[in-house]
Image (cartoon, helix red, strand yellow):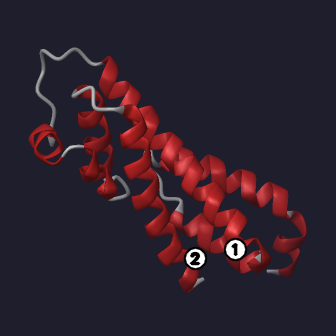
Amino acid sequence: MDTLAAYLSSDLSLWGLFISSLLAATLLPGGSEAVLFGVLKLHPELFWPALLVGTLGNTIGGMISFGMGWLLPQTQQLKHVEKVRTHGTPALLLAWLPLIGDALCLAAGWLRLNPWHAALFMLLGKFARYLVIALTA
């Protein structure tokens, strides 16, 4: 573990966390929770920076999915549209959920919901999830 820590500087760890969290929030498979956990084990002093970087990357990734939904023609029906139509942007508090979260983000974009509200609710949900993970590290 000490040799790994020597190679993973705090800056490199945060960049890796950002990229991992961004990609994990798009339609690409992957999970950034283990990366956050690892960063905090190697660099416990990065608690708040890692929490913020992970949340920011994951929110931007969610907004990429939102934007992809915005670009889809409204002639096809998407999964979870009715849930998002019923609950609006607060449904994006659950955007952190595996698989369902991606569909919620796509549906919110497809419905042309307010992107600022969507980003805010995504950010809040994703921050809460990362906070729970960070507190267990």
On the picture, is 128 further left or further right than 87?
Answer: right
Does the CB distance between marks 1 and 2 fall below 8 Å?
A: yes
For mark 2, what is the residue?
Answer: 134
Could you give the CA–CA distance between mark 1 and mark 2, rounded to whole angstroms? 7 Å
- Residue 1's place in the image compared with 79, above or below, is below
Secondary structure of the residue carrying numbered label 1:
helix
Q: Toward the viewer: 117 or 39?
A: 117
For badge 2, the amino acid type reads Ala
Q: Where in the figure is residue 126, as x and y percent of width and height?
A: 45, 59
Question: Where the N terminus falls, by quadrant?
Answer: bottom right
Question: Where the C terminus falls, by quadrant?
Answer: bottom right
Residue 98 seen in the figure? no
Q: Residue at x 57, y 76 (%)?
A: 134
Residue 97 seen in the figure? yes
Q: Residue at x 44, y 37 (%)?
A: 63
- Residue 72's place in the image compared with 32, above or below, is above
Q: Where in the figure is residue 124, as x and y percent of width and height?
A: 43, 58
Q: Where in the figure is residue 94, as x and y percent of width and height?
A: 30, 57
> Does label 1 or label 2 sit earlier along the sequence?
1
Decide: few, some or many residues near mark 2? Use Cα within 10 Å; few <14, some 14-19, many ≥20.
many
Q: Toward the viewer: 4 or 119?
A: 119
Residue placed furthest toward the bottom: 136
For badge 1, the amino acid type reads Phe
For mark 1, what is the residue?
Answer: 47
On the picture, is 40 further left or further right than 100?
Answer: right
